[in-house]
Image: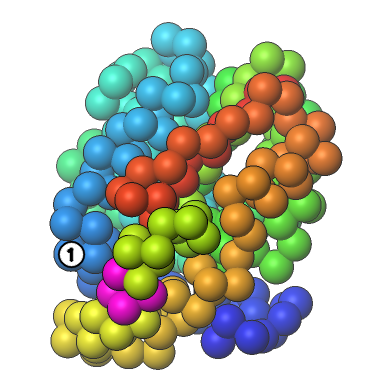
């Protein structure tokens, strides 16, 4: 679960996402009331990939961010990379998925030369990564100078927002595991989700790590009463 460390946690995450792959997209829609679709549009907009440019979407899952980018620019070279093959197999069945270059890869060891992509994106990935600073550095390595990193992450509401914090805790710790059990048959996976979010960095802490990794013009915006944040940085 969320208390696991190092390779044990990486193996747990890989196996868990493989098991919930068949209902992953449905659960995302239910948990967010469909707002995750709009958030991914914002991620693509913030990535600012030039026409016909190159985008790397890591922990691509079923490819939603890459597909959204391709809807904006059919000439885009979109690479979707993930170390959970079952998720990508589900994504391959989506309309337009044949235009994504699917690749099994780990964010901690990206198999690309330096300065390859115009932008790198991710959705709900970093809280599952066992070495966030290294992931941020790897993402920076494969992005061209002037290119961007954009990530979408769950975020605990600010401490001075009592009502959103109470609602957030009740929803993620009580409702989400129940719905996860009913929809996916895997309560433990959707118990892990709030636990991992509770242990993850605050938006300010993540922004600080991005700066330490060499990203510049780092900024973030909160959404959905502060429960989600989109971070961006420039190489």
Q: Is residue 170 magenta?
A: yes
Count the numbered circles shown.
1
Q: What secondary structure is the stretch in magenta mostly built from?
A: helix
- What residue do we see at 17% from left, 57% from top? 33
Horizontal and vertical percent for residue 134? 78, 52
Horizontal and vertical percent for residue 127? 57, 63
Q: Is residue 72 magenta?
A: no
Residue underneath mark 1: 30
- What residue do we see at 77% from left, 36% from top? 211
Q: Quadrant of the C terminus?
A: top right
Quarter residue 218 falls in: top right
Q: Quadrant of the N terminus?
A: bottom right
Q: Which residues are magenta?
A: 167-171
Asked if residue 51 can be seen in this view, the reply is: yes
Q: Secondary structure at mark 1?
A: helix
Coloration of the structure image: rainbow
- What residue do we see at 39% from left, 23% from top? 45
Horizontal and vertical percent for residue 204? 64, 46
Q: Residues within 10 Å of mark 1 (few under 14, many from 20)?
A: some
- What residue do we see at 81% from left, 32% from top? 214
Asked if residue 87 can be seen in this view, the reply is: no
Q: Is residue 209 left or right of residue 228?
A: right
Residue situated in front as seen by the camera: 115 or 165: 165
Q: Is residue 229 above or below residue 191?
A: above
């Amino acid at each position: 679960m969320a208390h696991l460390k190092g390779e044990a946690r990486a193996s747990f995450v890989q196996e868990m996402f493989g098991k919930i792959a068949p209902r992953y997209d449905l659960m995302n829609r239910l948990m967010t009331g469909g707002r995750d679709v709009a958030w991914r549009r914002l991620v693509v907009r913030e990535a600012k990939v030039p026409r016909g440019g190159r985008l790397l979407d890591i922990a691509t899952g079923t490819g939603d961010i890459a597909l959204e980018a391709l809807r904006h620019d059919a000439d885009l070279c979109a690479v979707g990379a993930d170390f959970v093959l079952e998720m990508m197999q589900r994504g391959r069945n989506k309309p337009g998925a044949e235009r994504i270059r699917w690749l099994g890869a780990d964010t901690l060891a990206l198999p690309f030369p330096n300065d390859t992509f115009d932008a790198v994106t991710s959705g709900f990935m970093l809280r599952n990564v066992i070495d966030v600073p290294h992931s941020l550095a790897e993402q920076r390595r494969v992005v061209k100078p002037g290119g961007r990193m954009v990530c979408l992450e769950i975020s605990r509401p600010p401490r001075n927002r009592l009502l959103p914090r109470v609602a957030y805790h009740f929803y993620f710790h009580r409702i989400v595991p129940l719905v996860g059990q009913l929809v996916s048959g895997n309560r433990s996976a959707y118990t892990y989700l709030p636990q991992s979010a509770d242990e993850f960095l605050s938006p300010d802490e993540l922004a600080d790590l991005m700066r330490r990794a060499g990203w510049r013009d780092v900024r973030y915006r909160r959404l959905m009463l502060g429960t989600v944040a989109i971070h961006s940085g420039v190489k």
